[in-house]
Image (cartoon, rainbow, N blue to C red):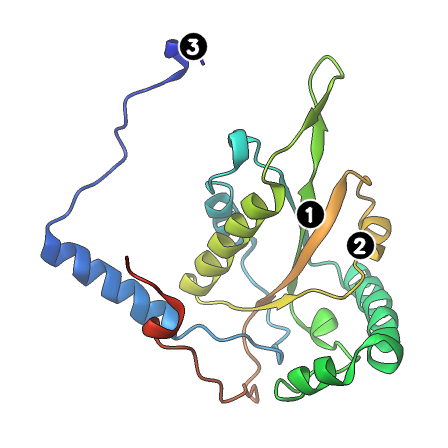
Amino acid sequence: MAEESFVALSTFRRYSAVEMQKRASEHYDEMSRRRTVRDFSSEEIDPSVIETCLRTAGRAPSGANQQPWKFVVITDSSVKRKIREAAEEVELQFYTREATRTWRDALKSLGTGPKKEFLDTAPCLIVIFAANFSYASNGDRLKHYYVRESVGIATGMLITALHKAGLATLTYTPVNMTFLNDVLSRPSSEKPFMILVAGFPADTARVPDLQKKELKDFTVFI
């Protein structure tokens, strides 16, 4: 890469050890409050909040800086209805024919089933696509690298941004998501990665009493 394509690092900020721990602890406390929600209010969200959170996601690192993600934001009720109808058709097939007993038992504690009311009720659906390739200005096909890893990082940053903005989210991944390309008129080069549901929890929202692993159970220090 030519030297002129580099610029001086001017955005990094260094903190004292005390300030580092304070900031890390504050962020941990904030993210410890994050819970996956399935019961949403229909209250609308200021579009500028979603836009700012998406800008945050767009700052994610990616393989060769190819940024292989596409976020489709849906607030139109008729489109949300189409997504729900298609998703529930896939889910019914899964729950009645495809899911193993072990898989169904694993989902039981979460209270999930083929009905997906949140796709209608929540004010905002963000469908995330992963682009395996793109085209250069001269028409050449450009392969993307580390696509799922890159899109996964961007999605995590988006979930964090939405939470810190005061919104609840649900990561929803039907077993077969190809219907999303049809409903949203996306090209076959973009593979559905996730439906991220965003909004405010309903006043009656309840969540499973789940426990997260302790640090020692998922970390090895060498």
Q: Are marks 2 and 3 in contact (CB under 8 Å)?
A: no
Estimate the x, y position of residue 48 in percent, counting from the top left. 52, 51
- Which residue is painted at 70% across and 64% down in the image? 173
Of the image marks 3 and 1, the number of the one nearer the N terminus: 3
Instruction: From this view, report whether residue 64 is shown above or below residue 147.
Output: above
* Left or right side of 30 for 127: right
* Cα distance in 3D space between marks 3 and 1: 31 Å
Q: Which residue is mark 2?
A: 180
* Cα distance in 3D space between marks 2 and 1: 9 Å
Q: Residues within 10 Å of mark 3 (few under 14, many from 20)?
A: few
Numbered mark located on residue 129 in the image: 1
Q: Residues within 10 Å of mark 2 (few under 14, many from 20)?
A: many
Position of the C terminus by quadrant: bottom left
Q: Which residue is mark 3?
A: 2
**Among the 4 quarters of the image, the one containing residue 111:** bottom right
Estimate the x, y position of residue 213 in percent, counting from the top left. 41, 77
* Cα distance in 3D space between marks 2 and 3: 40 Å
- Which residue is painted at 74% across and 47% down in the image? 191
Q: How many marks?
A: 3
Q: Amino acid at mark 1?
A: Phe
SS category of the residue bearing label 2? helix
Q: Are marks 2 and 1 in contact (CB under 8 Å)?
A: yes
* Left or right side of 82 for 164: left
Q: Are marks 3 and 1 in contact (CB under 8 Å)?
A: no
